[in-house]
Image (cartoon, helix red, strand yellow):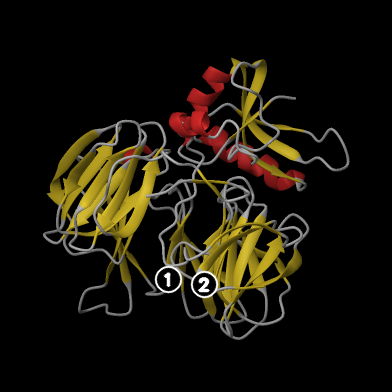
Amino acid sequence: MRAYRLPGLTELPGAIRGRLPGVARVVGIDLESELLFVTTANGELLSLDLGTSRVDTQATNVVVAAMGPDGTLFAIDGRHHVTSVARRVRMVWPQAVNTVPRDLFGGLDQRLFAVTAGDSAHPATLRLVTLAAGQPAAARQLPFAGDVEATRWGDLMSVVGDSGILLVDPIGRRDPGFVALPDHPRAIAFSPSGHRVYVASRNGPGLAVIDRYDREELDGIALPTPVATVRLDPFGRWLLARPSIGDSVWVVDLPIRRLTGSVATSWTQDLPAIAPDGSLLVAQGQDVIALRPDSLRETGRIPGASADLWLFTTWRSRNAVRLASDADTTSATPSGTDSLAATGPLYVQVSISQNESWSTEMAQQLSRAGLEAKVLPPKSADDGYRVVLGPYPNRGQAETIGRKLGRPYWIYQP
């Protein structure tokens, strides 16, 4: 395994120690516990301790695995047993699922949501099963069998139907709502805060935008052709769209809904993607390239790395910081963050946008999750509305809160 610093893609020797066997998939990373989870080709679920380099087997014969928003790891094996790893504590759940899920999503409070195929009497439907350790499973029938996506927090799901999408609260706090669309939906993606749903259609160009609360279609995003795949960056600033024809990515500036440009690239399970520092990473031929999404200017390149598996994270290796202290690159933490010795007031920033309503709704979403979130207004015409937690008196306290979020964050000092 290797680690690189963005935006220049400069390698950090010694940042990650320890050896892993052949990796089939990178599941995710628990920032608080500093555990990286991967699966191998023979179905082993392994954890790599990024601090001590220790590798442990957490489960075997794993067929599907997912990370929850708080860093909890969930895995289901071929015998339908559930294993979870939370704060380095491994648990095999007493209950099992009836069948191997088609999709798996982690939610808050260590809840697990499994989407399975409908039974023989309802082959064109799906079943949504909600599980929690030590509690009986709750199941409900979903009327469609299309693609399913969930918000980052697992508090809402969308299911694709022939003439629209169904919005479902997986724990039943609100009745499902159907949003009709003029064309057949094809691909869906939630904004990081979960307040918008972006929907691609099979025939119409561009994307439809749906408000999750009002459950109605808003103004869409104009694009030249229909879209096959949609991905968003961790902060909701950039949207990546894959045209239905050709190998390329469209880069959309979401606050102003403007198409920045197109980049030739293949699509894999991890690339193209927007990293937490805002860099756009794409695979071109045998190489991986870092670009500025606003200008599409190249900032770094790694030859022969396009076949590798990539994970983008805000985790910082103590060893790498020491070894790279003299490197002529920008830190993986945005350049506007304070130094380790800085004192408050400091904020944990989770998003910045020039759209005030988006930022306000995201802060409300975080507040409903029990966090003390607010919006800091712009200080200049070029600034944006910052969704933050805090303030905190020093960086240590701010970093502690940030690591518990289970999502990318910046440390911001006005």
Asked which quadrant contains residue 40, the reply is bottom left
Badge 2: residue crowd in 10 Å (few <14, some 14–19, many ≥20): many
Depth order, front residue of 116/327? 327
Question: Can residue 108 be spotted in the picture?
Answer: yes
Indicate the position of residue 109 as horizontal and vertical percent values.
35, 37
Indicate the position of residue 20 as horizontal and vertical percent values.
26, 50
Asked which quadrant contains residue 100, the reply is bottom left
The alpha-carbon separation of the residues under discs 1 and 2 comes to 7 Å
Specify which label sits upstream in the sequence, 1 or 2.
1
Please indicate whether residue 364 sits to the left or right of residue 76 in the image: right
Please indicate whether residue 249 sits to the left or right of residue 254 in the image: left
Q: Is residue 308 above or below residue 368?
A: below
Q: Which mark is residue 187?
A: 2
Dot 1 and dot 2 residues touching (CB under 8 Å): yes
Location of the C terminus by quadrant is top right
Residue, disc 1: 147
Mark 1 residue element: loop
Q: Which mark is residue 161?
A: none
Indicate the position of residue 182 as horizontal and vertical percent values.
62, 80
Q: Is residue 42 above or below residue 279?
A: below
Badge 1: residue crowd in 10 Å (few <14, some 14–19, many ≥20): some
Q: Is residue 41 above or below residue 376?
A: below
What is the three-letter code of the residue carrying label 1? Answer: Asp
Mark 2 residue element: strand
Query: In percent of the image, x 19 and y 59: which residue is there?
Result: 43
Query: In percent of the image, x 61 and y 16: which residue is there?
Result: 341
